[in-house]
Amino acid sequence: MEFGVCYYPEHWPPERWSVDAQMMREAGIRLVRIAEFAWQQMEPAEGHFEWDWLDQAIEVLAAQDLQIILGTPTAAPPAWLSHAYPEILLVDSEGRQRRFGSRRHYCPTQPTYHQHAKRIVGAMVERYAQHPAVVGWQIDNEFGDHETARCYCDACSNQFRTWLTKRYKNIDALNYAWGTDFWSQAYSDWEQIELPNLTITDPNPSQVLDFYRYSSDAYLQFQQFQIDIIRAHDPKIPINTNFMGNFADLNYHDLSNALDLVTWDSYPTGYADVHAWRMYAPGEARPEFAYDVGDPYITGFSHAIMYGLKQAPFWIMEQQCGNINWSSYNEGIRPGTTRLWTWHALASGADAVVYFRWRASLNAQEQYHSGFLRHDASPAQAFEELISMQPEQEQMRSIAAEQLNAEVAILLDYNDLWSVQIQPHRKDFSHMRHLFVYYRALQRLGIPTAIVSPDSDLSQYKLVLAPSLILGDTQRAELLGSYVEDGGSLLLGIRSGFKTPSNRVTDLSLPGVFQPLMNVSVQDWHALSPKAQYPLKSHIAGLNGAATIWAERLESNAAAEDAGIEVLASYAGGPFDGGHALTARSLGLGKALYMGWYPTEDQAVALLAHLAQEADVPRLAELPHGLLAAKRGENTILMNFMDETLSADVQGKHVDVAPRDVQVI
Ligand code: GAL
Ligand code: ZN
């Protein structure tokens, strides 16, 4: 494993650079990411480049054997550009053109913007691609951050229409796909189609889903545009863009396909605070951990999404290593936390951890953000910790050489997620949260879990969880059918197959295209208000209580035994009294299960303990709350996210783990 840091030479006097570079090297740092916001310094006026400072910064870093990841600076178009070409500015869903003065204020499809991006990126690559110290390109910075994934400008309106003509070819096909008979929405000409904002009430959900797809494709194209520029000068240096873990506005499966390397920015305290709404509904019980470590389930879930994109190791391109400046309390972190986060990333599949940032900024928006060095350049606590990790580096490297071998996978599809987001039907129903309940349960059970696209090769997994494949796709149903016949266990859940890929409801009996595979049909589905609880009974140990949030009543065509259906849970009271709630069917060498409600975390624990045992999936350990376990290669890694010592038995050994500490077995 390699250590790295984000560095901003443009923020500091050149005399300081060599001091910083030497300290970096001595602290065990090998990678330095630079320049991703330095457009103004590289091109202070249109077509006028100034490279001396960057040449010099690169030389100073290279002189210490540091390897450089260069960021293309398109996340921060300078003032001269934003003012001379205001058409490049992003327009938000309220129709407001956004201003210069922070960052990400551009539209990714705007042709004028592409011209300028091409000039700066091309010039950078031409100048530095051959430099022996340059080992990576980062495109832009955090596509979609600050709610910029969707732009509502005129260029986007045009591009959206072009995108639709490619997808549907003729307007009748579009009318059919969107179900435009409703409310007189049919189109007779492409020119009539607008963006789905500023409508009186809800816009057409099929149109919205296509707009989300278009918007994700717009970034995909902007990314490809930059890849092509880079590859024109540089055939080989790996290209990435920094993702944001569980961020859901862009289709990371698509974006990562075009990249050489997946990287993401991990800020555990921020994700557990201002972004926690993605993972927990308001009022939902949340687990407690040591106050300054964030929520390791959220962090781990993001790591798992990132690993699953290519089913391969990833990098952390920005790792929090002190307080941040964008959460509610921006708590200071205690000794041991940075190391714990580093180990958590490594155990979850990271090959490199690049920390954010070298030195706390004296200026502007992020002046309250920490770095390895304090504002006055004295080493902050995390810097000491970085040095204290040096003796562990060899062990970390050997672990980083291993793959992850999860035997359980959860399926994530951004189209399904968007469909639910557009019409959740029940307040606070979120696809991401739904997947996260199952993920937390598996973490509690000590079962390593992959999060992958339904289109990936599933043959390596013994158990696959598909909590909600709402957009039923025939080919997908066939693939899942073969997965089961070849010996896999598939748990398919609520709302699956309810819609077609264009976000209209299927006319098949539910779960739509998956019905033949499950051999049960959903006879009734109820969204449940917080007051409603449908009691359940089951023979599975610990699986009890009631269905909450969402419940479906299942029926088999013939009597259950004749249909080859085993009923694993049923309703015991309420409107679905006596109906099946969870069924299983043997098919070929495997098993197809249908899960008829949205489980609580405890219910998911009971169910998955049972299914894991049946599918012969081992648990790494019995874990007390706050102790997490992961496995990379043959190494089992225990990580303590609490303030007291915790222990577990691993491979017949009793292991104590001190607060915020790590043990490798
Ligand atoms: C990230 C961003 C960095 C910096 C950091 C502060 O989201 O990529 O540029 O702003 O947050 O925590
Ligand atoms: Zn736009």
Image (tube, rainbow, N blue to C red):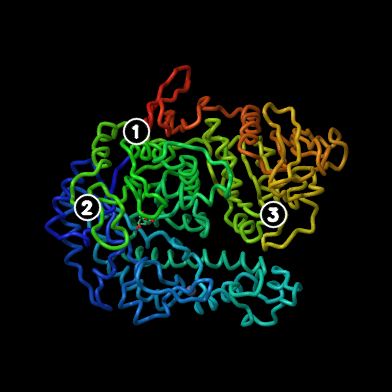
Tell us which disc is closer to us: 3 or 2. Answer: 2
Q: CA distance from mark 1 to mark 2?
A: 35 Å
Question: Which residue is farthest left?
Answer: 15
- Determine which of the numbered discs, if any, sits on residue 375 in the image: 2
Residue 571 appears left or right of 62:
right
Q: Residue furthest right?
A: 558
In the image shown, does 152 or 591 lie closer to the viewer?
Answer: 152
Name the front one of labels 1 and 2: 2
Q: CA distance from mark 3 to mark 1?
A: 42 Å
Q: Is residue 432 above or below residue 215?
A: above
Snapshot quadrant of residue 658: top left
Horizontally, is 595 left or right of 304 in the view?
right
* Tag shown at residue 398: 1
Ligand 1 - quadrant of the structure image = bottom left
Disc 2 element: loop
> What's under tag 2, amino acid-wise?
His
Q: Residues within 10 Å of mark 3 (few under 14, many from 20)?
A: many
Query: Residue at label 3?
Result: 472
Q: Pointer 1 and pointer 2: residues touching (CB < 8 Å)?
A: no
The disc, 3 or 2, on the residue closer to the chain's N-terminal end is 2
Q: Which tag, 3 or 1, sits closer to the chain's start?
A: 1
Image quarter of the C terminus: top left
- Does residue 130 appear left or right of residue 423 in this picture? left
The image shows residue 416 at horizontal and vertical percentages of: 62, 55
> How would you rate the neighbour count of disc 1 (Cα within 10 Å): few for under 14, some for 14-19, many for 20 or more?
few
Secondary element type, mark 3:
loop
Q: Is residue 462 left or right of residue 625?
A: right
Q: Which residue corresponds to the image point at 66% horizontal and 66% vertical from the top-left?
A: 206
Q: Looking at the image, is mark 1 or mark 2 earlier in the sequence?
A: 2
One can see residue 186 in this view = yes
